[in-house]
């Protein structure tokens, strides 16, 4: 194998390694719809709870099934912070504003509160927007 072929193989092997993984409840129509929106607008790999590898599960909090998560090579973001991180990756023009807002505890509290409010109403949201959950197929 030539050095070029080896480098090309390494690039394709590591590309997946650097793609942020959006971990979501793949038994929820609303969560599935949200994951599909993220895939449409950003560079993510969607991984449903039912598809998690042992290594991925080991990186998540014990109560991982209570929220969404974003796994990067060097961090794990959960709940509102995961959605925030995904939105910034989908719409990079938000990064400066979000960086400033993160400095405020009130913002972080509101972000997490809004996430929890929405997550606790997934059945209702699913009546408005939904996609067929992969785990339900």
Image (spheres, helix red, strand yellow):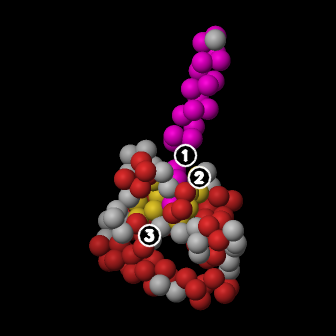
Of badges 1 and 3, the one in the foreground is 3
Q: Residues within 10 Å of mark 2 (few under 14, many from 20)?
A: some
Relative horizontal placement of residue 31, taking residue 72 as reference (left or right): right
Q: Which residue is mark 2?
A: 45
Toward the left, the furthest residue is: 105
Q: Which residue is mark 3?
A: 65
- Tell me if I can see residue 93 in this picture: no
Mark 2 / mark 3, whichever is N-terminal: 2
Q: Secondary structure at mark 3?
A: helix
The residue depicted at 64 percent of the width and 11 percent of the height is 1
| Residue shown at 64% from the left, 76% from the top | 29
Mark closer to the observer (2, 3): 3
Give residue 118's position: percent from left, percent from top.
50, 82
Residues at circles 2 and 1 in contact by the CB criterion of under 8 Å: yes
The front one of 123 and 97 is: 123
The magenta segment is 2-23
**Main SS of residues in magenta:** helix
Q: Secondary structure at mark 2?
A: strand
Neighbour tally class for label 1: few under 14, some 14-19, many 20 plus, Cα within 10 Å:
some
């Amino acid at each position: 194998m030539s050095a070029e072929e080896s480098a090309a193989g390494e690039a394709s092997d590591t590309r997946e390694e650097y793609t942020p993984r959006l971990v979501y409840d793949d038994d929820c129509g609303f969560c599935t719809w949200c994951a599909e929106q993220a895939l449409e607008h950003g560079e993510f790999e969607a991984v449903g709870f039912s598809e998690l590898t042992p290594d991925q599960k080991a990186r998540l909090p014990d109560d991982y099934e209570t929220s969404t998560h974003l796994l990067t090579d060097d961090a794990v973001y959960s709940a509102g912070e995961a959605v925030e991180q995904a939105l910034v990756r989908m719409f990079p023009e938000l990064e400066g504003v979000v960086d400033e807002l993160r400095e405020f505890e009130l913002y972080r509290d509101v972000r997490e509160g809004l996430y929890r409010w929405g997550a606790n109403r997934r059945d209702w949201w699913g009546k408005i927007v939904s996609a067929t959950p992969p785990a339900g197929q």
